Image: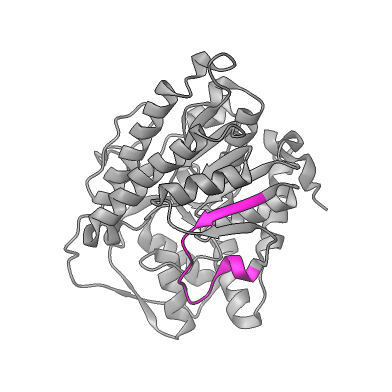
């Protein structure tokens, strides 16, 4: 039996934690983990319009405000009401192809929305730590065969990637201008970090235009899933992996470790950098109902073929590392959906406990 309240040295117990984007994919998993650790969780996000909703299935006891992070006045008022100790900013327009169709929404949400979060934090005296969640796509992608490090230039070919590069530049600006670690304990008491993760998969995701949800939704209808770019290579990881990274950052920031107030990569080991086609084949091994069809049409939108992260900094300085390899990641992801569709059972609690037990067995610092 996992002792949740002892994780991360018990730093989250009784803390007020505000999550933006709590209705998305990562948000419900993070809310579940925080609630189990004894945190008081608050959410601020748009309503989830998916046909099935992981947050509702979990039936957590979090308080929430359904609204848009671009509404600065509503956002600031909610911060004042909640008076959070720590903020995890996950809310975003997170789809590459949608960003081509609506770049204004993408930039306004991912840049100005993030600006509104930082301003709300700056005006709320209770806030002591902020983690801005971005993406591996924030880097200027040169499609080279080694991982990007945290000191590589920001960039972005498509509007989504560019907006996340902008979000990282905004984070750096606010860290330097208002939350400078050199001034910590003197001019302010707030530490700001960012987390950059690769392609995240796991149960509870039904978003449009993502590989695993597309596979699952087609399989549930007994249809073949159409694969656009089977040769694209990405760093695949279970959703709990980057969450453990974000929680590690929050732990360090709440402990007033100023060295953690930087940008960090959280990705899998090199064996998990696989092509889309390989992920589909692995998925079929765990659910043989999965059928695929390779698209013969050339996509009108550019998508990167090769993108990887170098996580040496997090491995060495935070003592963080991935827990599950690619086989277990796919097993846990596909099994979650298979169990839901065939037996109407939710495996989220079981998966979280097993992940923590495996982390403890591997002597990973946050789990000890």
Q: How many marks can you see? A: 0
The answer to whether residue 197 is magenta is no
**Relative horizontal placement of residue 297, taking residue 341 as reference (left or right):** left
Task: Name the spot of residue 114 as percent of width and height, x first.
Answer: 40, 43
- How is the rendered protein coloured? one colour
Residue at image position (43%, 51%) is: 69
> Which residue is nearer to you in this view: 312 or 37?
37
Task: Name the spot of residue 124 as percent of width and height, x first.
Answer: 55, 35
Residue 338's place in the image compared with 204, above or below, is below
**Relative horizontal placement of residue 184, taking residue 35 as reference (left or right):** left
Residue 264's place in the image compared with 29, above or below, is above
Report the residue that reaches farthest toward the bottom.
222
Residue 308's place in the image compared with 55, above or below, is above
Residue at image position (40%, 61%) is: 278
Task: Name the spot of residue 159 as percent of width and height, x first.
Answer: 25, 50
> Start and end of the magenta stretch?
41-57
Residue at image position (54%, 70%) is: 53
> Which residue is nearer to you in this view: 116 or 325?
116
Task: Name the spot of residue 46 as percent of width and height, x first.
Answer: 46, 61
The image quadrant that residue 58 belongs to is: bottom right
Residue at image position (65%, 33%) is: 251
The answer to whether residue 51 is magenta is yes
**Relative horizontal placement of residue 252, taking residue 272 as reference (left or right):** right
Residue 307's place in the image compared with 204, above or below, is above
Query: Which of the image's four quarters has the C terminus?
Result: top right
């Amino acid at each position: 039996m996992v002792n949740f309240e002892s994780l991360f040295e018990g730093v989250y117990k009784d803390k007020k934690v505000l999550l933006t984007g709590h209705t998305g994919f990562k948000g419900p998993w993070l809310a579940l983990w925080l609630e189990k650790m004894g945190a008081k969780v608050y959410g601020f996000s748009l309503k989830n319009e998916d046909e099935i909703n992981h947050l509702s299935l979990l039936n957590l006891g979090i308080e929430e405000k359904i609204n848009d992070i671009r509404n600065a006045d509503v956002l600031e008022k909610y911060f004042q009401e909640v008076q959070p100790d720590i903020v995890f900013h996950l809310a975003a327009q997170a789809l590459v192809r949608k960003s081509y169709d609506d770049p204004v929404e993408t930039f306004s949400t991912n840049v100005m929305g993030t600006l509104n979060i930082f301003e709300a934090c700056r005006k709320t005296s209770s806030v002591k730590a902020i983690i801005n969640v971005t993406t591996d796509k924030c880097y200027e992608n040169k499609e080279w065969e080694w991982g990007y490090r945290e000191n590589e230039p920001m960039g972005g070919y498509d509007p989504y990637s560019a907006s996340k590069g902008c979000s990282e530049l905004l984070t750096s600006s606010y860290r330097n201008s208002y939350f400078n670690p050199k001034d910590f304990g003197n001019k302010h008491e707030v530490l700001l970090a960012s987390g950059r993760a690769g392609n995240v998969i796991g149960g509870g995701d039904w978003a449009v235009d993502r590989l695993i949800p597309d596979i699952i939704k087609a399989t549930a209808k007994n249809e073949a899933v159409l694969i656009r770019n089977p040769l694209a290579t990405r760093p695949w990881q279970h959703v709990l992996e980057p969450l453990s990274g974000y929680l590690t950052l929050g732990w360090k920031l709440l402990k007033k470790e100023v060295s953690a107030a930087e940008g960090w990569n959280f990705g899998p080991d090199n064996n998990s950098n696989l092509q889309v086609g390989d992920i589909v084949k692995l998925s079929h091994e765990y659910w043989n109902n999965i059928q695929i069809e390779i698209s013969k049409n050339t996509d009108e939108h550019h998508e990167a073929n090769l993108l990887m992260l170098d996580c040496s900094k997090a491995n060495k300085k935070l003592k963080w590392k991935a827990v599950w390899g690619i086989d277990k990641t796919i097993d846990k992801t596909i099994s979650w959906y298979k169990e839901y569709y065939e037996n109407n059972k939710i495996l989220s609690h079981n998966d979280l406990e097993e992940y923590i037990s495996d982390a403890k067995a591997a002597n990973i610092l946050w789990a000890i």
